[in-house]
Structures are given as structure tokens and as C-alpha cells.
Amino acid sequence: MENHQKMLDSYFGRLSLSKSRESEHNRNESHHKRLTSKEQTSSKAAGSRRNTMCLSNVRSGNSKARNIKAAGRLSNIAERLPDEILLKIFGLLRPCDLLVCSCVCQRWMKLAGDNLLWQPLYERYKLSQPGEPDSVYTTHAGTRWKRAFMDRCIQRRNTRLKQLLKKKDPYTGLPANTDSILEKLGTKWYVILRDRDDRLHSFCDSDVSYHNTSVTVRWYPPEFIPPDKIQGFDFKAEASVLFERDGSPIKDSPRKSSHLLSIPWKAPHVQSINRGEDDALNLRLPYPGVIVALWKDGGGLAFLSLSLHKWGLVERCLLGDNNSAYQPKLIRPPADDVDSQYGLHGYTCIVELRQQRMPCWSERFTKIHCPKEKIDGGHVTFTLIHMDTETDHSALTRKLCLPWKTDLFKGIYQDLCILDVTLFDEFSQPFWSVCTPVSVKKVEKGDLSMVYHGEQFLVHYSDCKGHIDASIVRDGDDRYLVTSLILSLKVEAINSWFSTSYS
């Protein structure tokens, strides 16, 4: 038995040794085959790439075809759905999503405007302030609940707006939250160019800047229509209608348009600025507050600029309609037969000289008055800064000029700035508001000041209510000082406002 056991051990030992040698041989052979396969693969790579590209193109074409077929199938499914099912689906959507669905096709527009969808939404959007007047709609067959819902949302927005406008800025006397209100409303500013064929070309604002008493909006899209084809300009503001609980506008909310201003183009009264011309631009002033910049090379439109005074601006942006501008209500003071100087005292005036984005100079004057005896030539004159009183003189923080920019170019238009004037009567009601570009005219030395010996400039503006003149001097320290400021009101404007009879 022991011999048999030894024989078996010897046999299995030889067998395992032969298997190990065989596996080593197989490993070497497989390694050789892999090397050979790599060489063959590299030699065929160039040809296979072309085949692969062709195959991928075929597959991409097939994929696109499948996507088109799938879209067609989905479209067919939506078309085959009965009206009742679509109404059930539409009932789960938000108001802004319903408005998007109404733009898909005529059938969806009809279904998405169904009264069954909009009456519950109308009931849900109630005024937050109890006791406030609300739109009255009775349930009858003729009620268009979609229109009623939109009216209620606008009413809720305007009711909330009245609360926000109550706070006054202590410096300007205007609503303190004008900038934030316009931004929270998601206000967009549009200029609409009417061509000779009565076609409309709309452009959204490129830049908006807020100042103490005014707002400046600029448009410089990549390409305007040629100026010789323009018939006129329409300026409009659009604000959102639907808002989140935190007061922010809902994305894709419907927007209500308010007309601000319409002006013709190439009318006889269009003013051209001849002083301080830029090497690249010619400027035109077709209306107070409006700048139209034309390229000297080619004559195309470079940019448009609109400056608006903040008095009543929020109401103008919200309460107007698409074709007519909102006119803020004027609160005239009561007649007074006792005060012999009524309408000649108690004024407050804020004057600002600025660029389109940056301020240059601003001052506030209170308790302005003029004795009745000094009424001369049909004008009441108020001297705000006396030339002979050096303590009244104040320095500009920046040079008076008009930096401009487009998508590709920028520059500086010299000797031009924007003048903002706000004049309140003794009852803190706005009597006169001005926001317009003005020229900075260089005058001969000695005409304005005998104290300063540098360059001297004059800023002048006038309209139907009065005029204002500012004298500016460059001193030896290379500073620009406002050395004189005179405000003159027409007697007929004062008589119309205060119901007086000065002459």
C-alpha cells in the first residue's frame, strides 16, 4: 500500500508540473496574439474612422428623425385630447402658465381663457387691505373672468403702491422709494420707432441710472433702423402684474404697458447742438429730456437717451395705458386774500447738474422769497447764489460733460450736461420740474465774475414757466465753482397757480 501511495504522489506531482508549464505557454502565446492584434488594429485605424463617422452621421440622422416622429406623436396626442381633459390639465396650472398656453394655438387660447378656470383665480386674488374699493363683477354669462382677474391683480398692485409712495425723501420732498419701487415692479423701458410705412420697431432699455430727482434711460442696441426711415419715437414703460408673496414679480408674468411720450422726428423744432461737438457724434434734441445721437460717419443712430423727472413718475409708469400718458393730478393751493405777498415766498428749490450716470453738483435752497416791489418785466426773480458772496460759492465734483457709450464705442461729448430743477411752493406741492440736457457755454472773461480769473461758463434754460441761469468759473486750483444761480418765474405762471393778480 505504501508503494501504491508513493506512485500516486509521484503521478500527481508530474501532472501539476505539466499543467503549470502548459499555462505558462498559453500566457506567452496570448501575449503574442495581443501584440499582433494591436499592430493590426493600428494599421486599420484610418479606414475605420471614416466608417465610424459615416455610421455616427447615420445614427444622428436616425435620432433626429425619431425625435421629430416623437414630437409629432405628442402633438397628435394633444390634438386628440378632448376639451374636458385639457380643461382639467389647465386647471392645475398657475395663471402665468395659463397665459403661456393661450399662445400655443387658437384652440388652446380659447380653452385657456375659459371662465371655469379664471373665476376661481379671481376669487383667490382678493385685496389684502379690507375696506379698500374693489372691482365689482357679478356672476352672469357675459362676465369675462380672465379680464376681471387681470383687473383685480392690477388693482392689488396699485393699492399696495399707494402705501409705498407715502414716505417722502427729506432732501428732495419726492417719494423716497421711487428707485426701489420701479425695480421691484420689474419695470422695463421701451422705445418704439415708427418708420415711414407705419411699422413699429421696439427696443428694450440698455442702461438705467437713478439720481436724486430724475431717471435717465439709454438705448444702444447693435443696430437701429436708418434715421431717414424714422417717422417718430414712442417711449413706454412696462411693469409686471403678478407678484410673489414677498413682493417680487413672478417670472413670465404678464406686463401692462404705459405710454410716456411721443415725439415726431425731423420736425422743424428739432434742435441741433453746435457747441462742443464730438469727433464721432452729432446730437439732436427733439424734445426736452430726449437726446438722439447720430454717427457722423454714415449718419446712423448711435444711441437714444431719455431723462425723466421723478415727480409722478411711478404713477406714469403704472396708471397710463398703451396709447395715452397718465397725467398726475395737480393740487393747487387755495386762494388767499389776506397775504399781500401770497405766491412770492416759502419756495424750496433743488438744482442738480449731472452727467447721464454720475452727479456733478447738487444744492437745496429753502425759504426762497422775492418782495412784491421787485417784480419787473413780467418776471419774479429769486437769487439763489449771490456772485458777490464767496461763501455761497460751491465746487463741482466732476467736469460738466456728457460721457456716452454704445456696445462697441465710447467717448465724451464736451460742454453738455443734464439740468434737474425741482421747485416746491410753500405747501410742498411741485410747482415746476425740469429734467433736460443743456449746453455749457463759454463766455468772455470778466462778463460774469471780477473775483475769479479762470475760464467762465454759463448754463441757461427757459420754458413757459420761467428760466434759470447758472454761472460757473474755473479757479486757479483747477476747480469748477458755481458762483451765481438765478431763478426767474413768469408772473402769469404764479397767477395761474395761486389765483393771484400780480402784474
Image: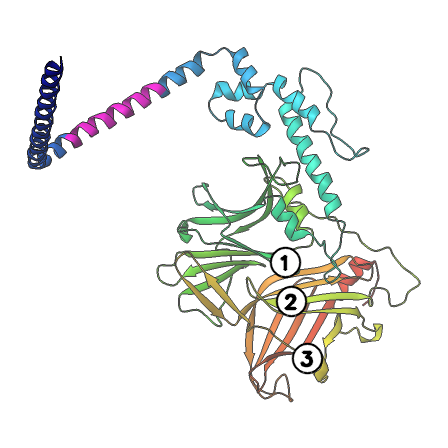
Indicate the amino acid at tag 3. His
Q: Earlier in the sequence, mark 2 or mark 3?
A: 2
Label 2: state its secondary structure: strand
Q: Locate residue 248: give its quadrant.
A: top right
Q: Is residue 457 left or right of residue 41?
A: right
Q: From mark 2 to mark 3, how far is it between C-alphas?
A: 15 Å
Secondary structure mostly taken by the magenta-highlighted segment of the chain: helix
Viewed as shown, does residue 328 lie left or right of 303? right
Q: Which mark is residue 393?
A: 3
Residue 352: name its quadrant: bottom right
Residue type, mark 2 in image: Glu
User: Depth check: 36 or 184 in front?
Assistant: 36
Q: Amino acid at mark 1?
A: Ser
368 relative to 463 in the view: left or right: right
Total numbered labels: 3
Neighbours of disc 3 within 10 Å: few (<14), some (14-19), many (20+): some
The residue range painted magenta reads 52-70
Q: Position of residue 243 (x, y in %)?
A: 63, 36
Task: Give how far across and how far down residue 48 sits, in percent.
Answer: 11, 32
Residue 360 is covered by the magenta coloring:
no
Task: Report the residue at 43% width, 69% height from top.
Answer: 278
In depth, the one of 52 and 111 nearer the eye is: 52
Circles 1 and 2: CB distance less than 8 Å?
yes
Is residue 270 something one can see in this rendering?
Answer: no
Q: Position of residue 414 (x, y in %)?
A: 49, 71
Query: Quick one: label 2, few (<14), some, or many (20+) residues within 10 Å?
Result: many
Residue indicated by mark 2:
352
Q: Secondary structure at mark 1?
A: strand
- For the residue pair 44 and 15, the one nearer the viewer reads as 15
Q: CA distance from mark 1 to mark 2?
A: 10 Å
